[in-house]
Image (cartoon, coloured by chain):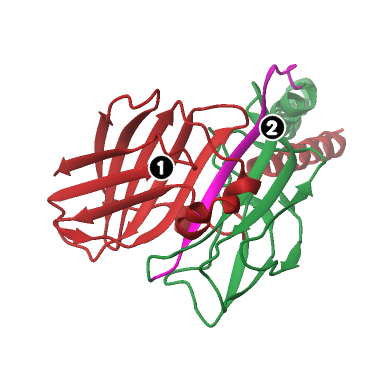
Amino acid sequence: MRKIALAIAVAMVVIGGVAAYARSTQGQPGNGPSPQDRFGVQGAHHRVDRDLGPVDGRDLIVVDVVVGTDRIAVRYTASGIQPVQFEHINDNPVFAREGPTFITADADGKPLTRYDGTESSVVGSSAIQGEIVFLWQGGQLHRLNISIARIMGDGHAHWTATFDF
Amino acid sequence: MRHPAARMAQICRLPLTLFLAGLIPAATLALATPAEAAATYHPGAYSWHYVYLPDNSYQGADLNQADYYMWSDGTESVSNMYAGISRSSNNAGTTMIWSNAWLYNYDGTVPLYVYWARNDCGLGCYWSQNMWSGWKTVQAQSHYGITVHGIYGGCCRYYAEPTMGLWWP
C-alpha cells in the first residue's frame, strides 16, 4: 500500500513538474537575433508629441526623440499619406536616388547623417508610423531641426520643425 | 502500542502529501482546456525599411508584408509574408546578396526559420518574394518579422548589415 502510494505520488510530481517546465520555457529567449540590438536606440527619451499641422490634408506628429550615445531616433505618425506603390518607387528618378521618404536634420547646426529608417502601415491605409535614425557623435543635444520633404513618395507631406531640449 | 489504523495513517501521510502536491499541478494542466479565442484580422500589414550608406546616400528599400490574426488568448497567427527589395540607382559598383531570412520574436526566439537567398537583381530594380504562406502562431505583440542580411562588395555598412523588420501597428 505504501509503495503504491509513493509510486503514484512520485509519478504525478514528475508529470506535473515536466508539464509545468514545458510551459514555462515557451517564449523564452533563444538564439535568435535581438531586434532591440538592431532597431532600438537607447538613450535620453524626449516625449515630444508635437503636431506639425495639417498640410494639404496630411498631418504629422513627432511622437518622441531618443538621443543615444551614437544615434538619434525620431519617431512619428502621419495621416492622410498617399504612398507610392513599392514596386513603383524607382519609376520616379528622384525617389530612386533619394528614397521615397526624404527627411534631413541638423543638430546644433551640424547636418546629421541618416543611418536607418522604417515606416509601417496597412495596405489601403493612409496612416503610417515611422522612425528615422541619424548618426550622432554623442553629447548634449540642444537643438534639433528636422526637414521633411516627403513621406513614402507623397510630396504633399512636407514639414519643418525645431525642437529645443 | 498505537492502533493499527493510526499506524497506517502515519505510514501513508508522507506519500499522500506528495501525491496531493503532484496531483494539483498535474490535474490543473490536464483539465485546463484553452478557451475559444476571438480574433481581429489585420491583412496587409507592411513596413518599408530604408538603407543608407555612411556617406548619407540612399541605398534602397526593403518591403516586409504579412497578414495576421491577433487572438484574444495572447497569440498571433501570421501568414502570407512577403519580402521585397527596391534598389537605388546611386549604388553603382555595389554587389548585394540577400540571404538568411527568418521570423523572430522581439524576445529573441525564432518561431519559424525560412531560408532564402537571392542574388543582386541590378540597379533600380524591384522584386518581391512570398516568404511564407502557411500559418504560424506566436506570442502576441511579439514583433516578429523578416531579417535580411545584405553583403556589400566594395562598401560596407557603418554599424551593421541592413536589416528589415515588421513592426506591428
Residue A4 image position (x, y, % from top left) = 87, 36
* Residue contact between numbered discs 2 and 1, judged by CB atoms under 8 Å: no
Front one among A77 and B60: B60
Q: Which chain is green?
A: B
Residue A145 image position (x, y, % from top left) = 21, 48
Q: In this orientation, does residue A28 appear?
A: no
> Which chain is disc 2 placed on?
B
Question: With B66 as the anchor, is A1 left or right in this view?
Answer: right
Can you identify the residue that label 1 sits on? A150
Query: Vertically, is A24 above or below B87?
Result: above
User: Chain A appears in which tint?
Assistant: red
Query: Vertically, is A88 above or below B114?
Result: above
Q: Residue at x 63, y 31 (%)?
A: A123
- Disc 1 marks a residue whose amino acid type is Arg
Front one among A46 and B120: B120
- Disc 2 marks a residue whose amino acid type is Tyr
Q: State the image quarter where residue B36 is shown.
A: top right
Q: Which residues are magenta?
A: B34-54
The quadrant of the rendering that contains the C terminus of chain A is: top left
Q: Residue at x 34, y 38 (%)?
A: A158
Residue A89 image position (x, y, % from top left) = 58, 49
Question: With B7 as the anchor, is A53 left or right in this view?
Answer: left
Q: Residue at x 42, y 65 (%)?
A: B57
Is B38 in the magenta? yes
Can you identify the residue that label 2 sits on? B68
Query: Vertically, is A158 above or below B33?
Result: below
